Image (cartoon, rainbow, N blue to C red):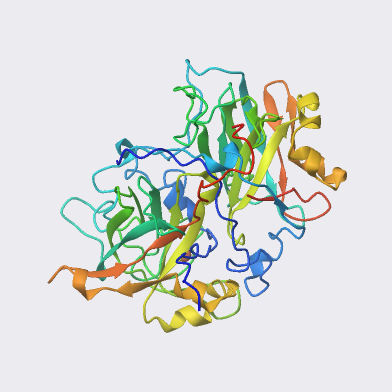
Amino acid sequence: MVQPLTYFKESASQTAGPYVHIGCTPNFSGITGVYAEDLGSGSLVNDNTRGERITIRGFVYDGVGTPLKDALVEIWQADADGFYNSPSETRGKADPNFFGWARQPGDMATGEFAFETIKPGKVPFRDGRLMAPHVNFWIVARGINLGLNTRMYFSDEEEANAVDPILSRIEHRVRVPTLIGRREGNTVTFNIYLQGDNETIFFDI
Amino acid sequence: MKNTPPETTPFFARDRAWHPPAFTPGYKTSVLRSPQRALISLEGTKSEITGPVFGHNILGEFDNDLIVNYAKPGEMALGERILVYGRVLDERGVGIAGALVEFWQANAGGRYRHKKETYLAPLDPNFGGFGRTITDENGGYVFKTIKPGPYPWPNGVNDWRPAHIHFSVFGHGFAQRLITQMYFEGDPMIWICPIVKTIPDENAIKGLIAALDMQNTVPHDMRAYKFDIILRGRRSTFFESRKEGN
Ligand SMILES: [Fe+2]
């Protein structure tokens, strides 16, 4: 016998189901009057937010190319200087005018999601090397048993992407473009493919 | 909140054999929505170990009372009145203070207030079916609701969901983000549900079943169910094998 290790197990995940919007974006789902607004639904940007304004748009596609109309997408990103607005951010103080987290449902008719935000700065990897600017994504929906984590990098950051510690360790180079949002003007398009030839890289974080 | 220093270490690796796999053909919708390639492992960087903090200012007075938060003045939702309470802990057993907990559910007849819902059970005009709260300094939370009913759903020709409440939980890091469902002690429907059965480990399923707790019942008012939610734990900081570059 040995001394027992007293750890709990993480609660098992279950799908968000078809009615996740009732709980997470009730106003969007048509139930008004309980919450003043849906959490995370507005623009991340106000007049005093530092950084370059961008809109991230995209769809989540299933294995036969049909856009999901019931997905819920959350993003988490650093501010323009690469600081997260979080107590666990110990390197410096993030822009008080940038919350860094937002949540959007896909449009009920088309499935498209959109985030009004800023382009994040570079955040160091664990060894101090800088990671290229990126936005962290979390995707849930009916049929997804455990939320999916991925990252969006930027097509206008080729140099930084080339030395990014995460991107550069990916063995199958042909898959790397699935993590790159395509920037045109102030719009960055980032489509997420759950399955198929273009399956997005998802991370075990 | 207690004045403890923020934790900056990565989370324990997620036990993927404990959670449901992505591809679970018994739950048909997962078939085309399940990534088929291996996940790429990413040891927690600042991007994963940090997370947003939600202030109590987002909460309305009745956000954690589903019996009244949608009801007309002076009226209440129909159904078995219950309290659901518990703690949000991490795998080390440490209570997670300030965690945002959101919940949604069907009404007492098993009907959701949603455009795409087709079940013939009636809507309750006094029940919206959702609420939220933020955990106290020990990770504790509580809300009032009515016990949801089971409902049929399109999967197999005769599949039913057991009574359940959906939960969405934020810990302190984006990598702790979790959505799950709570079931009720003694419900025989749990063990024949295709969504429950996506979870391979029976003990993992038992971890989602709330216990009837007569000790916390409010006499002549409402019974209590206890449901603790466990999020990923953080590694200790005894030694760092790399320099603290971040
Ligand atoms: Fe449900």
Q: Is residue A131 above or below residue B230?
A: above
Q: Is residue A118 above or below residue B82?
A: above
- Numbered label tally: 0
- Would you say residue B161 is visible in this rendering? no
Q: Report the residue at 65% width, 51% height from top.
A: A68
- Would you say residue A26 is visible in this rendering? yes
Residue B223 position within the rendered picture, expressed as x and y whole percent measured from the top left: 22, 71
Residue B176 position within the rendered picture, expressed as x and y whole percent measured from the top left: 51, 50
* Residue A129 placement: quadrant: top right
A5 or A118, nearer to the observer:
A5
Left or right of B183: which side holds A16?
Answer: right
Residue A21 position within the rendered picture, expressed as x and y whole percent measured from the top left: 48, 51
Q: Is residue A61 above or below residue A6?
A: above
Q: Report the residue at 42% width, 40% height from top.
A: A38
Left or right of A15: which side holds B104?
Answer: left
Instruction: Kindly give the residue lying farthest to the bottom in the view shown.
Output: B188
Left or right of A121: which side holds A193?
Answer: right
Residue B10 position within the rendered picture, expressed as x and y whole percent measured from the top left: 56, 46
B119 or A121, nearer to the observer:
A121
Q: Report the residue at 68% width, 72% height from top.
A: B25
Q: Report the residue at 46% width, 69% height from top.
A: B119
Q: Is residue B58 above or below residue A70?
A: above
